[in-house]
Image (cartoon, coloured by chain):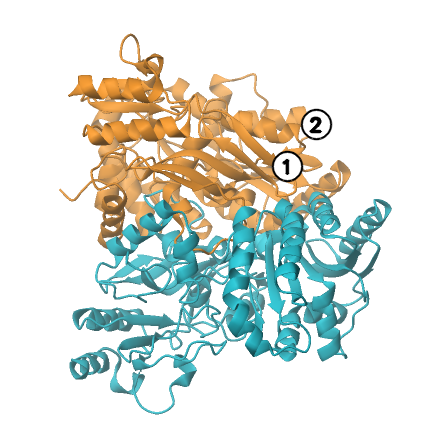
Chain colours: A cyan, B orange
């Protein structure tokens, strides 16, 4: 059977784009090295029609297709399982920016375009594509959409879903939906676009997208502020939203231990407000001038100081200083990795519930796992915390994870649910959280998801076992 | 059978809320008076559980449920057919604002809340709910979401879909999905929310929603500008977007004939820039001050004058003047109605394609229907035109419609498709455009929609015949 399938795949894409030998770990091993699969073949189609032909070949041979972009996902959703029967479909060769429409403020890119290349193409035209995240140098726009990526600009510009106007998609039957609309309004039927976005390749394979662009801001300005409590961070957020409106483009929070880890492992990075309980990183984009932006920021921070919401603050004096402040924020995951293995969470809560969630959950964790260390940081403006847990100092991190990861996840996710939150804010479900989702999603929501999966992919061709599984 | 069903409905909601006698035209006749149906009963549940009980009763008796909010829809999607067998489910009694969360900037409202009441509730708390449209005094938030309403704030704040974070929905099986999330990020599975939004009651009945709020702007400012061509209007839009960024909250365009109709039928309304080919109405919201907003607006308009994009402009001197300018814009549909019956279109195009679309289609219409008058206006910032056609002067409007409506729709929709547009930007499909959708939507998109309808409503209980019909 697999011989006939391989022949059909070679027919679809040309033999040179069907890889079966040698080291395929670039496609078979996920970025976090938690999932090492084995593919029947890695297939690299060069066009939408070739993607459709690959899907038809797999469907007719009863094989599963696992689509992959830049292989930077964090939940094992883009690598094959270890059965050796799944076909890994890499979109990497489909990396053309097909069009830019200045008056419509849109850009149409193929799925395999690297996010940073899309940003740079827009910038070269004097425009902004605002999706931005740590993996932007290697993740692809197709993967960003398939996983509804978040990142650091969500507060102002929304998730990947909000940045997409139209899609081109290959269905489970190997047909092509030409939905590359550049329209801001279109009420002609069900929202297929938003259904494919975030479905992690389980309902269709995104081959191209029409994306929203924005005028480039004239000035960007970054500030750090020191807060005594998370309540004060939330109050500062409200003040900044009221005074800066859409000019507030980033609002990150970093707990003291998270920054202490950065100081320990990357001592060369500047930390202008050391030793404070909570540090807020704010970014502002301004359409007028740097002078205007700075005046707004300074007035905001003075007001916050007067109200006692912050104890100290600095505004970056140059774009180099701004980048340095962001670099500290982005170094937290690396500093964690240097410190040792850890248990990552990617939770979302209503902003108002973040302080009580953290207060309650910190205590529960310290009680149940004395000495465990909390690396707490995230996109406070979006209600998204990376509430990570590191082994007690001196303990073996590997042992700690082996013994306690499940119990810690249960404790954290129970608390998230009790506070009206989500166990996956921006990373998705993939293979990693399928069981958690089954255990925690409302049964009717799961049933609706299963119905949709069955309707759109009745034979389970597309990324089976990810996101939602048939009822067991 | 209907006796047993009526008994079950009375059991579900109490007999007083099951109306079968007297004048039910408030529910059976649509706002445009194009659809007059006949319901088996009008049922007015007072809670989500009662809605679910009504749906279960109808499902078990094989009856269809037609959900209705404020009955202001324009495509006949919310009134029963004339069979006398459909149950009209009015959400009007479910009109409680359940919660406001200041720190999270969210408001949770039941489906029957009138849009204006939601706006006012937010405003009373110093916050903004930005959805705004002509019917806001009687349309309901459930209907707004079921039809993914647009309106005048889409350019800055998006359609109803973008303003909703979570839903409570009664499914076709009479179960309740508790999806009232207040989360900005949630990647736990398929996007059920956006699938129900815009499905016009055919996939589920929205009973409540959690909506995004925004800080109230400090100042709002309105300006009119005169343009010699639609190309200049589009260039002005680009300039305004670059200079005002998210401060640009409205960008409407009005053709000369549209404003002439307003002058004829409402001569008391001010028209400070009479007799120009195209008039742009711009609105700006500012977080700083009226002085700041005015300075930005005046600099923008001066620059546009220098570049020759506009020939004249006025900035409203007071909020009363602002309202008067908006009143002119909002009076265009009423002036059309005074002038006589007309053929309405609600089309969307990429902004860049609007000038060539209008140039080509105007000529085609004038050639095919000499003397026909084009009432052209709309939300240019969103690429949404209400490209309406009025009978030649002196002709019987009724005769003109009877003889030419189908041919004119065909001509206009062919042109829309040729320019990459949509035949329904914000009004939806309902009963009116089901045939057009079948004729014009890509077959695979229709097939996907039918699969989803069948998966979520296998027995055709919810608003059958609207949006998408089973394959004939």
* Residue tagged 1: B313
Which badge, 1 or 2, comes first in the chain's sequence? 1
Q: Is residue B248 visible?
A: yes
- Percent position (x, y) of residue A21? 31, 90
- Mark 2 and mark 1 in contact (Cβ < 8 Å)? no
Against B281, residue A91 (above or below) is: below
Which residue is farthest top?
Answer: B22
Left or right of A459? Residue B355 is: right
The quadrant in which the C terminus of chain B is found is top left
Chain letter, disc 1 residue: B
Residue A202: quarter of image: bottom left
Residue ranking furthest to the right: A306
Q: Visible in this render: residue B147?
A: no
Q: Position of residue B167 (x, y in %)?
A: 44, 40
Q: Residues within 10 Å of mark 2 (few under 14, many from 20)?
A: few
Which of A455 and A391 lies nearest the eye of the viewer? A391
Spot occupied by residue A294 in the image (x, y as percentages of width and height): 79, 56
Residue B318, labelled with which disc? 2
> Would you place residue B380 above or below residue A372 in this image?
above
């Amino acid at each position: 059977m697999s011989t006939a399938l391989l022949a059909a795949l070679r027919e679809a894409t040309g033999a040179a784009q069907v890889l079966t030998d040698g080291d395929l770990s670039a496609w078979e091993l996920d970025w976090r090295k938690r999932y090492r699969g084995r593919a029947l073949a890695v297939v690299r189609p060069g066009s939408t029609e070739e993607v459709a032909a690959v899907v038809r070949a797999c469907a007719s041979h009863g094989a599963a297709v696992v689509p992959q972009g830049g292989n930077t996902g964090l939940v094992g959703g883009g690598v094959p399982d270890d059965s050796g029967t799944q076909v890994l479909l890499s979109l990497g060769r489909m990396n053309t920016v097909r069009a830019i429409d200045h008056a419509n403020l849109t850009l149409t890119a193929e799925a395999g375009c690297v996010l940073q290349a899309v940003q740079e193409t827009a910038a070269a035209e004097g425009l902004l594509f605002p999706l931005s995240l740590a993996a932007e140098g290697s993740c692809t726009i197709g993967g960003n959409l398939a996983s509804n990526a978040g990142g650091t600009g969500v507060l102002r510009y929304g998730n990947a879903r909000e940045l997409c106007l139209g899609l081109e998609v290959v269905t489970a039957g190997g047909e092509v939906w030409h939905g590359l609309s550049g329209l801001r309004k279109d009420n002609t039927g069900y929202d297929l676009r938003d259904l494919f976005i975030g479905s992690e390749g389980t309902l269709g394979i995104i081959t191209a997208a029409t994306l929203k662009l924005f005028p480039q801001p004239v000035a960007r300005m970054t500030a750090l502020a020191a807060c005594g409590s998370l309540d004060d961070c939330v109050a500062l957020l409200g003040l900044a939203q009221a005074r800066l409106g859409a000019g507030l483009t980033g609002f990150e929070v970093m707990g003291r231990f998270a920054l202490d880890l950065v100081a320990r492992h990357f001592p060369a990075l500047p930390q202008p407000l050391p030793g404070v309980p909570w540090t807020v990183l704010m970014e502002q984009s301004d359409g007028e001038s740097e002078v205007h932006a700075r005046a707004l920021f300074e007035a905001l921070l003075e007001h916050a100081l007067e109200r006692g919401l912050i104890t100290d603050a600095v505004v970056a004096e140059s774009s180099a200083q701004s980048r340095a402040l962001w670099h500290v924020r982005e170094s937290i995951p690396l500093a964690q990795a240097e410190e040792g293995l850890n248990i990552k969470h990617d939770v979302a809560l209503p902003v108002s519930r973040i302080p009580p969630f953290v207060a309650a959950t910190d205590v529960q964790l310290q009680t149940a796992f004395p000495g465990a260390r909390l690396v707490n940081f995230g996109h406070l403006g979006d209600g998204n915390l990376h509430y990570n847990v590191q082994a007690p100092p001196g303990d073996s991190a590997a042992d700690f994870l082996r013994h306690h990861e499940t119990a810690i996840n249960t404790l954290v996710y129970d608390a998230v649910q009790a506070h009206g939150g989500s166990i996956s804010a921006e990373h998705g479900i993939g293979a990693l959280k399928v069981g958690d989702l089954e255990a925690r999603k409302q049964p009717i929501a799961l049933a609706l998801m299963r119905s949709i999966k069955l309707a759109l992919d009745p034979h389970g061709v597309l990324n089976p076992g990810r996101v939602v599984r048939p009822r067991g």
